Amino acid sequence: MLCRYLASLLPSGVCESRGEKSVEAVIARARLLGKTRVAFIHGEKGRASEMHLVRVRASSWEWLEPAIKLKSVRFAELPREPPECVVFEGPGSEDWRELLAGEECEDKRDAVRAVCSAHSLKFLFKRKKVIELVFDVSGRC
């Protein structure tokens, strides 16, 4: 569910199940689709517990540090139309823009707002919270 939400909120995001694919096979698929970031979401007891991000380049790839340990994830209703871009705000916003390969917005009216605080990352669309990631103490933001 977390993957589906993030793919819906991040422009040009795609959600695919890893299944039995190796990390290298997932990276190859990302290259085929022209993607520069991949998020591996790990679950424990039916809920998302960690997110690992990868930077994909033409002939190489690298894990981005640190792994993001999730304490909880809260979902609300997804927007009907995909947003044009994401505006990152708050402490750590530059780090998150780099991690998620976010581009600058020209028209911020129809943008998703990604609001960073010390222990959470909230995605809001048209003033409504869509998803909130709450980090363990060792999480990132």
Image: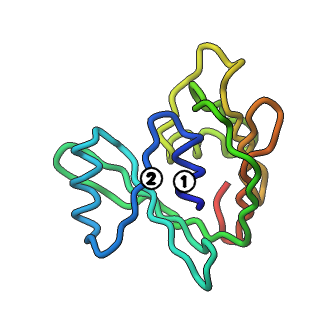
Which residue is labeled 2 in the image?
15
Residue that appears at 72% across and 18% down: 109
- Extreme residue toward the top, this view: 107
- Colour convention of the picture: rainbow
* Residue at 28% from the left image edge and 60% from the top image edge: 26
Q: Residue furthest front?
A: 80
Secondary structure, mark 2, is: loop
Residue closest to the eye, 57 or 124: 124
Residue 96 rendering spot, x and y as whole percentages: 59, 45
Left or right of 17: which side holds 118?
Answer: right
Task: Name the amino acid type tagged 1.
Answer: Arg
Residue at 29% x, 49% y is: 30
127 relative to 5, above or below:
above
Left or right of 126? Residue 102 is: left
Location of residue 64 in the rendering, given as x and y in whole percent from the top left corner: 43, 58
Question: With 100 as the anchor, is 116 left or right in this view?
Answer: right
Secondary structure beneath dot 1 equals: helix
Q: Which mark is residue 22?
A: none
| Callout 1 crowding tier (Cα within 10 Å): few <14, some 14–19, many ≥20 | some
Where does the C terminus fall, quadrant-wise?
bottom right
At horizontal 40% and vertical 48% (from top left) the residue drawn is 37
Crowding at mark 2 (Cα within 10 Å: few <14, some 14-19, many 20+): some
> Mark on residue 4?
1
Q: Amino acid at mark 2?
A: Cys
Is there CB contact under 8 Å for labels 2 and 1? Answer: yes
Label 2 vs 1, first from the N-terminus: 1
